[in-house]
Amino acid sequence: MADLSGLKADLTRRMDGAFDTLKREFAGLRAGRASPALLEPIRVEAYGSEVPITQVGTIGSPEPRMLTVQVWDRTLVGAVERAIRDAGLGLNPAADGQMVRVPIPMLTAERRLEIVKAANRYSESARIAVRGVRRDGNDQIKNFEKKSEIGEDEAKDWTDQVQKLTDQYIKRIDEAFVDKEREIKQV
């Protein structure tokens, strides 16, 4: 006999993964406020290879329009400064001893629209990922039915449950996008 609870748990886990990825991507979108997540994707040339900025210093947000990176190794201050400048985020860091200060400039209306479009692209990617999980779940249900492990009515019930789960996640993604859009336009 086929196991719906295992299938549902697997689909939920995979949909959660798509939603968590969306939240991480949203965290990296600058909304005019200083967020340490803005710098986390940056990689720094250190010790002969590229490492995440979080492995060479501590990122802080002492005030709403300022980020700081407390670099642990004084010799890497220049590399951290360069990595932030070259990241394409429109930031201009300044070294102050072992601390790199990163002022967050005000956003222009044009830049806000670009950020909203990026958020929309991230949301659509998350929706596509969730729908892909739904398709995989429905394929598994069809296989169970084909192997006569479940009946036609049971397959329909399972397919309906998978659709309800998909609808819940799509709704969460849409709500997250609306919240992010509001945050970007507010600042």
Image (spheres, rainbow, N blue to C red):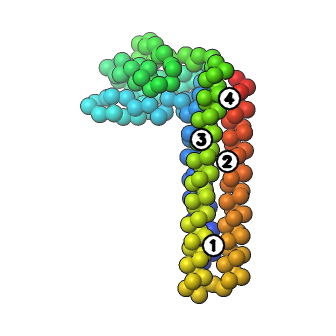
* Mark found first going from the N terminus, 2 or 3: 3
Spot occupied by residue 16 in the image (x, y as percentages of width and height)? 60, 54
Q: Find disc 2 in the rendering and name its residue.
A: 173
Dot in front, 3 or 4: 3
**Disc 2 and disc 1: Cα gap in Å?**
24 Å
N-term mark: 2 or 4: 2
Tell me which amino acid carries mark 2.
Answer: Ile
Secondary structure under tag 4 reads: helix
Question: Along the horizontal axis of the image, is 128 left or right of 87?
Answer: right
Write the residue at 63% across / 22% down: 110
Disc 2/disc 4 C-alpha distance (Å)? 16 Å
Q: Which residue is mark 1?
A: 5
CA gap, disc 1 to disc 3?
32 Å
- Which of pointers 2 and 1 lies earlier in the amino acid sequence? 1
Label whose residue precedes the other's in the sequence (1 or 4): 1
Cβ–Cβ under 8 Å for marks 1 and 4: no
Q: Residue at x 60, y 75 (%)?
A: 141
What secondary structure is marked by label 1? helix
Q: Is residue 11 left or right of residue 174?
A: left
Q: CA distance from mark 1 to mark 4?
A: 39 Å
